[in-house]
């Protein structure tokens, strides 16, 4: 069975053009598109998704990722239901603690407890239940027969546990190596047991950093680069990347210097972490992720620096359309 493939699309074009680009992603064979929620871009993710819903018919659409700091949980519940009305059965609400969006308003990321309460409150609202905010009772006047599923974006082990405890699914940045995936599954199970629930209907999507280049060696140099001047690429969005790499036996010091990573180390990191190389190499790595790690769905996250985060993923879409998606089913 072919792995389902979603892709991150930024609001790197006027929203009408971005919606058209998302339609091209559906035609290329992607199962879903996630668009980042960066208010500092000057373009709103939910308006973009609404326009994309009118241009597509099959793919799942979601913010990747929204957060409860820049948007109140009551507002998120309303937005999720509205998107569900526009694209029934194709909407997903994906919530994380925030990174660039919250940093751009001078706020810290949402804490573990803030995330827990936000997910629980949004779920209650989408079910038509009453929630109390600051001593005031509120509920949604309109809800869907089937509430929009709520996923958590989780990079760190504690956030992965929380996803297992309270969410309907998880977008996890934990790598593709069998030991990394197994460690994340154990964390999900810990959370599920804490929440007194099972994971039978829990959906797991693996955030998969991706660089596709006809020069496969060049594609594998990302671990040696910086995301921005004060943050190595391997610490974006957090230091938790190092935690999961250690599960695969790849040990980097907390204060490592990217330029000191050898080419052979970079190759091993890229193989454990995501899809890096030529289109054919990425196809083979994706096949291995299915057979070795049991991965069923990935969210392609094109590698970028902070300055390049709004570039449209043209090379990735072309490679998946022409080589990787057809290659999975051939």
Image (tube, rainbow, N blue to C red):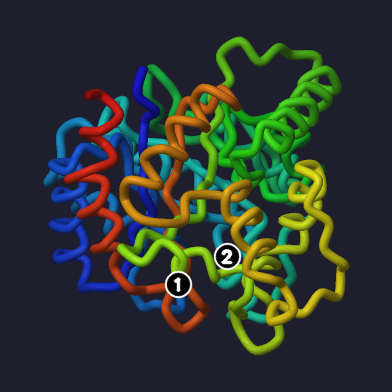
Q: Which residue is mark 1?
A: 39
Q: Which residue is mark 2?
A: 70
Q: Quadrant of the C terminus?
A: top left
Tell me residue 146's x, y (percent): 41, 19
In depth, the one of 198 and 243 nearer the eye is: 243
Q: Residue at x 69, y 47 (%)?
A: 133
Category of crowding for the residue at label 1, using alpha-carbon neighbours closer than 10 angstroms: few (below 14), some (14–19), many (at least 20): some
Q: Relative to 296, is 72 on the left or the right? A: right
Q: Determine the image quadrant of residue 259.
A: bottom right
Q: Residue furthest bottom?
A: 229
Q: Relative to 277, is 328 on the left or the right? A: left
Tell me residue 95's x, y (percent): 57, 47
Q: Relative to 99, is 29 on the left or the right? A: left
Number of the label disc, if any, that sits on residue 221: none
Q: Quadrant of the N terminus?
A: top left
In depth, the one of 200 and 112 nearer the eye is: 200
Distance from Cα at disc 2 to Cα at disc 1? 8 Å
Tell me residue 248's x, y (percent): 76, 42
Query: N-terminal of the two: label 2 or label 1?
Result: 1
Q: Secondary structure at mark 2?
A: loop
Q: Relative to 78, is 48 on the left or the right? A: left
Q: In the rendered image of this protein, does residue 107 appear above or below residue 32?
A: below
Q: Determine the image quadrant of residue 251.
A: bottom right
Q: Determine the image quadrant of residue 181.
A: top right
Tell me residue 321's x, y (percent): 19, 45
Q: In the rendered image of this protein, does residue 119 appear above or below residue 164?
A: below
In depth, the one of 267 and 25 nearer the eye is: 267
Q: Residue at x 48, y 29 (%)?
A: 149
Q: In the rendered image of this protein, does residue 120 appear above or below residue 241?
A: above
Given contact means CB atoms under 8 Å apart, are the residues at marks 2 and 1 in contact?
yes
Q: Secondary structure at mark 1?
A: helix
Is residue 114 shown to the viewer in this render?
no
């Amino acid at each position: 069975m072919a792995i389902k493939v979603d892709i991150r699309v930024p609001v790197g074009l006027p929203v009408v053009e971005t919606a058209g680009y998302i339609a091209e992603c559906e035609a290329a064979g992607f199962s879903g598109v996630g668009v980042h929620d960066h208010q500092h871009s000057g373009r709103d993710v939910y308006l973009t998704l609404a326009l994309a819903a009118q241009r597509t018919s099959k793919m799942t659409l979601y913010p990747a990722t929204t957060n409860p700091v820049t948007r109140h949980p009551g507002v998120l519940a309303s937005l999720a239901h509205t998107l569900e009305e526009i694209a029934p059965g194709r909407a997903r609400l994906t919530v994380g603690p925030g990174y660039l969006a919250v940093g751009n308003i001078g706020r810290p990321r949402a804490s573990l407890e803030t995330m827990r309460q936000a997910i629980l409150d949004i779920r209650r609202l989408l079910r038509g239940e009453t929630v109390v905010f600051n001593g005031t009772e509120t509920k949604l006047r309109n809800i869907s027969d089937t509430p929009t599923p709520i996923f958590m974006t989780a990079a760190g082990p504690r956030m992965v546990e929380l996803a297992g405890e309270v969410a309907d699914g998880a977008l996890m940045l934990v790598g593709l190596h069998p030991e990394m995936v197994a460690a994340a599954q154990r964390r999900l199970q810990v959370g599920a047991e804490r929440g007194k629930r099972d994971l039978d209907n829990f959906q797991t999507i693996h955030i998969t950093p991706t660089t596709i280049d006809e020069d496969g060696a060049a594609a594998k140099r990302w671990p040696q680069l910086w995301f921005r001047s004060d943050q190595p690429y391997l610490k974006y969005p957090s230091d938790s990347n190092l935690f999961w790499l250690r599960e695969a036996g790849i040990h980097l010091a907390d204060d490592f210097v990217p330029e000191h990573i050898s080419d052979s180390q970079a190759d091993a990191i890229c193989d454990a972490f995501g899809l890096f190389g030529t289109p054919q190499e990425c196809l083979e790595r994706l096949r291995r992720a299915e057979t070795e790690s049991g991965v069923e769905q990935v969210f392609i996250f094109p590698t970028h620096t902070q300055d390049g985060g709004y570039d449209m993923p043209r090379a990735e879409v072309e490679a998946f359309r022409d080589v990787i998606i057809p290659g999975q089913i051939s």
